Image (tube, helix red, strand yellow):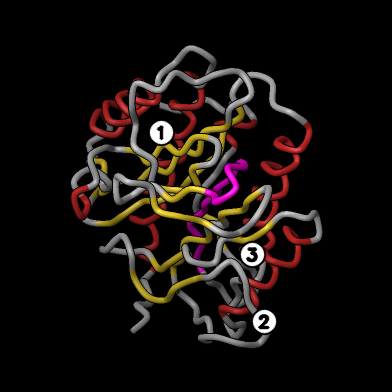
Amino acid sequence: MMSLKTEEEIELLKENALLVSKTLAEVGKAVKPGVTTKKLNDIADAFIRDHGAIPSFLGYEGFPAALCMSVNDAVVHGFPSDYVLKDGDVVSVDCGTIYKGYNGDSAYTFPVGEVDEETSRLLEVTEKSVDLGAAQAIAGNRIGDIGHAVQSYCESFGFTVVREMVGHGLGKSMHEEPEVPNYGKPGYGKKLREGLVICIEPMINAGTRSIYLDDNGWTVRTSDGKKSAHFEKTVVVRHDESQILTTYDYIEKGIEYN
C-alpha cells in the first residue's frame, strides 16, 4: 500500500535529500584518476556522520559499505574496494541516509578524467531522463507515464533500459511501494496521488539491457561489458508540478554548502 506523506514528513525527507545531495558533491570533489573507490566511500561515511545522520546502506541486508560504488560495466550495488579509478572510467555513486527517522536516497554517475563521446552522451541522456520522468510525477498520472518518459527518451539515443531494477517509494523505510520502473506505457500502472514520495532512478546501458549478478551476490553488471549510468532523484508527487527534493547543483554549479 502506498504511503502518502504529510507536509511535515516531506520536510524531513527534504532534509535527508539535501544531505545526500551534499554528500554526493563531497564525493565528487575527490573523483579523479588514482583514487580508490574505498577512499570515496570513507569520505561519504565521515561526511554523513559529521552531519548527525547515519549511512542507511551500511548493513542493509548485509551490504558492507556506506555507498554503492559501481564502476564502468557495474550497473548498481558495486562494493567500494581498492580499485584505483582510471582516466576514462565512470563511477556511479548511490548514497542513502537516515536522519530524524526518515531516509534519503539519490545517485550520480561521475566521469573520471576525460571520457569518450559515447560515454559522455550516455551520462547526459540518463541524467536528463530523470527530470523527464519526474515531470510526469503529477497527481492523476500513472506510474507508466514516468517509465515511458524515461524509456522513450533514452531509447531514442540507442541506449537500453535495465528492466530488472526499479525505483521505489521512500519514507521511514528505504524501499516503499510503489515500484517505479524505468519503462512503461502511458496511462498504465498505479495512479499517482498528492504526497507520494518516490525515487526515480534510471539505470541505462550503452549496449544490451541484459545484465547478470556478480559472484559477490550484490553487484549487477552489463552482460556485454559496456558501460552503464545511474542517476536517482527523490521526487514528491504534487497536483500541478512535481517537487524534486534532490539537487545536483552542489555538483554541477559549485554551490557552497556546509
Q: Quadrant of the N terminus?
A: bottom left
Depth check: give the residue in front, 50 or 70: 70
Secondary structure at badge 3 equals: helix
* Residue 152 falls within the magenta-colored stretch: no
Pointer 3: what residue? 133
How far is mark 2 from mark 1, CA to CA?
A: 34 Å
**Position of residue 82 in the picture relative to residue 122 (left or right):** left
Q: Which residue is mark 2?
A: 185
Residue 15 visible at all: no
Give the number of marks.
3
Whether residue 47 is visible, yes or no, is yes
Residue 119 position by quadrant: top right
Q: Which portion, as a residue range, is magenta?
A: 222-236
Amino acid type shown at disc 2: Lys
The image shows residue 65 at horizontal and vertical percentages of 26, 37
Residue 11, disc? none
Q: Is residue 173 above or below residue 213?
A: below
**Which amino acid type is marked by label 1?**
Thr
Q: Earlier in the sequence, mark 2 or mark 1?
A: 1
Q: Residue at x 34, y 21 (%)?
A: 82
